[in-house]
Amino acid sequence: MMTKDDILLLKTKLLPPGAEAVIDFLAARHSQLESTNIVLENVPLLIIGRHGMIARLPLNGRIKKVSQAEEILPALQAYFNNASSGDKLFVFINLPELPIPPEVQQVLSEVEARAMRREEIRMKIDRALDERNREAFDRAVKELEELMREEDSTVGPTPSST
């Protein structure tokens, strides 16, 4: 079974035209969906890729293949109207992640490095407290305060502080 969140997470990817309505429809039937990592034969199957969708569904005693966005949703509706509650639709998803621009990746790396540095300093403070080393504690606290000042100066004023 696919969770409703798994299905709705698809909306954060680069979807082919017409896929959003299909995903909304599938979200209501998530208990009848099964995710697959391979394209299966002879089973009800929906493939969602970057450039389009293909559905192979048993309708009127035959396997019907539809690939036009405007045909897929009615075919899925017909399939689920005739399917028993135990019937599954297998879903194969081949969508790229949204690309992260290099500038954003750089900012994320800087934030991660500062967070790691802050954690290292907090560990120094904890060690100094455990050892009852006042001098090491004072140095680590000053180091943490300096790091916090640097972060405040690089972030700038927030909308709520103006």
Image (spheres, helix red, strand yellow):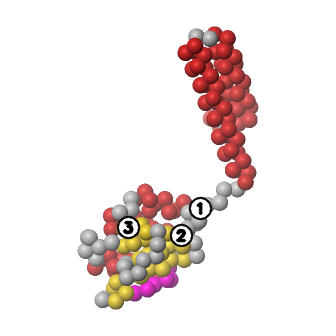
- Extent of the magenta region: 64-69
Q: Is residue 67 magenta?
A: yes
Q: Is residue 39 above or below residue 151?
A: below
Q: Position of residue 103 (x, y in %)?
A: 73, 51
- At label 2, the amino acid type is Asn
Neighbor class of circle 2 (other Cα within 10 Å; few <14, some 14-19, many 20+) is some
- For mark 3, what is the residue? 34
Between the C-alphas of marks 3 and 2, the distance is 15 Å
N-term-proximal mark, 3 vs 2? 3
- For mark 1, what is the residue? 97
Would you say the residues marked 3 and 1 are in contact, meaning their CB atoms lie under 8 Å apart? no
- Quadrant location of residue 64? bottom left
Residue 22 shows in the view: no
Q: Is residue 116 above or below residue 76?
A: above
User: Which residue occupies the foreground of this view, 13 or 89?
Assistant: 89
Check residue 57 in the rendering and tell me which mark sits there, or answer none: none
Neighbor class of circle 1 (other Cα within 10 Å; few <14, some 14-19, many 20+) is few
The residue located at (65%, 38%) in the rendering is: 159
Q: Position of residue 107 (x, y in %)?
A: 70, 45
Neighbor class of circle 3 (other Cα within 10 Å; few <14, some 14-19, many 20+) is some
Between the C-alphas of marks 2 and 1, the distance is 10 Å
Between the C-alphas of marks 3 and 1, the distance is 21 Å
- For mark 2, what is the residue? 94
